[in-house]
Image (spheres, rainbow, N blue to C red):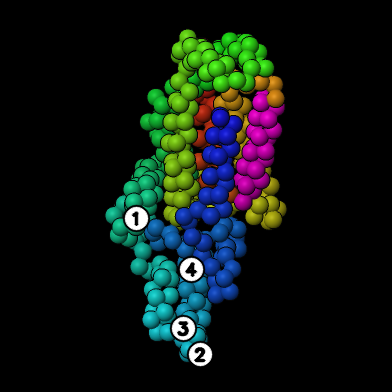
C-alpha cells in the first residue's frame, strides 16, 4: 500500500510538471517561446509585469505577431469578427498587469478557488519575504522553511511513525512467517487482528503517513505554479541566475550549474532513503529500491530543464525532510 501511495504521488507530480496550470507562451506557429539567453520557457499567464527588457520585448513581439495572424484570418474570413475579438482579448498584454512589487492576492480579479486562495496568496508571500531580505532567491528558501515549520507537527508525527514501524519490523516479520501459507479468510482476519495489536503496541497509526502526502502535493503544485508565474522571481539572482536552467547553462559552456543538479540528486536520494518504510519483505524492499532509483533518476533528469528558482525550492524542501528525520532517529 505504501509503495502504491508513493508511486501515485510521484506520477501526479510528474503529470503536473508536464501539463500543470502554468500556460506556456506560444508564437504564431504554435511553438513554445523561450528566452534565448536563459533557456527559460516563458509563461503566458504571468501574475504581474516583467521588468527584464528582453522578456518585455519577447512578450510584446509575440502578441503583435499573433494579432497579425488573427488579422489575416479575419481578412480571409477564416474566423468571424466575434472569434477574432475573443482570441485578441485572450492574449497577454503586459501593459495591463500590475507591478510585481504591488501585487496582492486580489490583483487581476478572481481566478478561481485554486489560483486565488493558493497560488496568488503564496505568490504574494514570496514577493513580500523576498522584498524584506532584498533577494527573491533567499525569499524562496525562507518561505519554504516557514511553510515546513508550520507543518512540522504533522510531518514530525509522520517521521516518528516511520521509526515506530522500524521498531515493529521483527514482530511484523514473525507475523508474515506465521501466516505465510495461510490464505483462507479466517486466517487473513486473524492476521489482520494481530497486525493491529502490533500497531497498538508500537503506537503506529497506518493512516498518519497519508496526511503529509495529501498536504505536500497541493503545496508543491502551488509553489511550482507561483515560481513560474512571477517574473520578479526569475529575474533575480542568488549565486545562480534564477531563470536559467542547467541545460541552457551547459549549452553556453557554463558548467557551474551542475552543482545544482548534484544537490538535487543528493537531497532527493537521502530524503527518499530516510522516508523508506521498514515493514517490508525482501522482495518488497527490492521493489521499493528499484522504484526509488527510478523516481530519483526521473527527478534528476527533470532538474536539467528546471529553472534555478524551482531547484532552490526542491533542495530546501528535501533538506528539511532529511534534517527532520535525522533528528527523529537521534531522539529515538
Whether residue 145 sits left or right of residue 294 in the image: it is left
Q: Give residue 96's position: percent from left, percent from top.
A: 35, 68
Q: Which mark is residue 112?
A: 1
Q: Residue at x 63, y 38 (%)?
A: 295
What stretch of residues is rendered in magenta?
Answer: 284-305
**Which mark lies nearer to you, 3 or 4?**
3
Q: Identify the secondary structure beneath mark 3.
A: loop
Q: Residue at x 52, y 49 (%)?
A: 16
Please tell me whether residue 16 is drawn above or below residue 144 in the rendered image: below
Q: Is residue 217 magenta?
A: no
Residue 76's tag is: 2
Q: Mark 3 highlights which residue?
A: 79
Task: First in sequence, mark 1 or 2: give its number.
Answer: 2
Tell me if mark 3 has few (under 14), some (14-19) or many (20+) residues whose alpha carbon lies within 10 angstroms of its own: some
Kindly tell me whether residue 267 is visible in this rendering. no
Determine the CA span between mark 1 and mark 4. 25 Å
Q: Residues within 10 Å of mark 1 (few under 14, many from 20)?
A: few
Viewer-nearest of discs 1 and 4: 1
N-terminal label among 3 and 1: 3
Q: Is residue 21 visible?
A: yes
Of the two numbered discs 2 and 4 on the same chain, state the one appearing first in sequence. Answer: 4
Residue 312: % across, % down: 53, 41
Is label 4 in a helix, a strand or a loop? helix
Quarter of the image containing the N terminus?
A: top right
Amino acid at each position: 500500500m505504501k509503495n502504491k501511495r508513493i508511486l501515485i504521488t510521484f506520477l501526479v507530480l510528474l503529470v503536473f510538471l508536464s501539463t500543470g496550470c502554468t500556460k506556456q507562451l506560444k508564437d504564431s506557429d504554435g511553438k513554445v517561446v523561450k528566452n534565448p539567453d536563459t533557456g527559460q520557457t516563458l509563461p503566458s499567464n504571468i501574475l504581474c509585469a516583467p521588468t527584464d527588457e528582453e522578456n518585455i520585448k519577447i512578450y510584446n513581439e509575440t502578441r503583435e505577431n499573433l494579432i497579425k495572424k488573427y488579422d489575416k484570418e479575419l481578412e480571409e474570413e477564416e474566423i468571424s469578427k466575434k472569434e477574432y475579438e475573443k482570441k485578441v482579448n485572450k492574449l497577454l498584454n503586459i501593459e495591463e498587469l500590475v507591478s510585481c512589487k504591488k501585487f496582492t492576492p486580489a490583483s487581476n480579479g478572481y481566478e478561481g478557488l485554486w489560483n486565488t486562495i493558493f497560488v496568488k496568496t503564496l505568490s504574494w508571500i514570496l514577493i513580500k519575504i523576498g522584498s524584506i531580505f532584498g533577494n527573491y532567491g533567499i525569499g524562496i528558501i525562507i518561505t519554504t522553511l516557514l511553510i515546513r515549520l508550520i507543518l512540522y507537527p504533522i510531518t514530525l508525527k509522520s517521521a516518528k511513525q516511520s521509526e515506530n514501524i522500524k521498531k515493529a519490523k521483527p514482530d511484523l516479520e514473525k507475523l508474515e512467517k506465521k501466516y505465510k501459507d495461510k490464505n483462507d479468510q479466517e486466517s487473513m482476519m486473524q492476521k489482520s487482528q494481530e497486525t493491529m495489536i502490533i500497531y497498538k503496541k508500537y503506537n503506529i497509526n497506518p493512516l498518519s503517513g497519508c496526511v503529509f502526502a495529501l498536504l505536500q502535493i497541493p503545496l508543491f503544485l502551488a509553489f511550482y505554479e507561483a515560481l513560474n508565474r512571477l517574473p520578479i522571481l526569475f529575474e533575480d539572482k542568488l549565486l545562480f541566475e534564477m531563470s536559467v536552467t542547467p541545460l541552457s547553462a551547459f549549452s553556453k559552456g557554463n558548467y557551474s550549474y551542475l552543482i545544482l543538479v548534484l544537490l538535487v540528486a543528493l537531497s532527493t536520494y537521502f530524503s527518499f532513503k530516510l522516508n523508506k518504510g521498514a515493514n517490508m519483505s525482501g522482495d518488497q524492499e527490492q521493489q521499493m529500491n528499484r522504484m526509488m532509483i527510478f523516481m530519483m533518476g526521473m527527478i534528476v533528469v527533470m532538474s536539467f530543464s528546471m529553472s534555478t528558482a524551482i531547484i532552490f525550492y526542491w533542495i530546501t524542501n528535501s533538506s528539511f525532510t532529511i534534517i527532520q528525520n535525522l533528528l527523529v532517529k537521534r531522539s529515538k
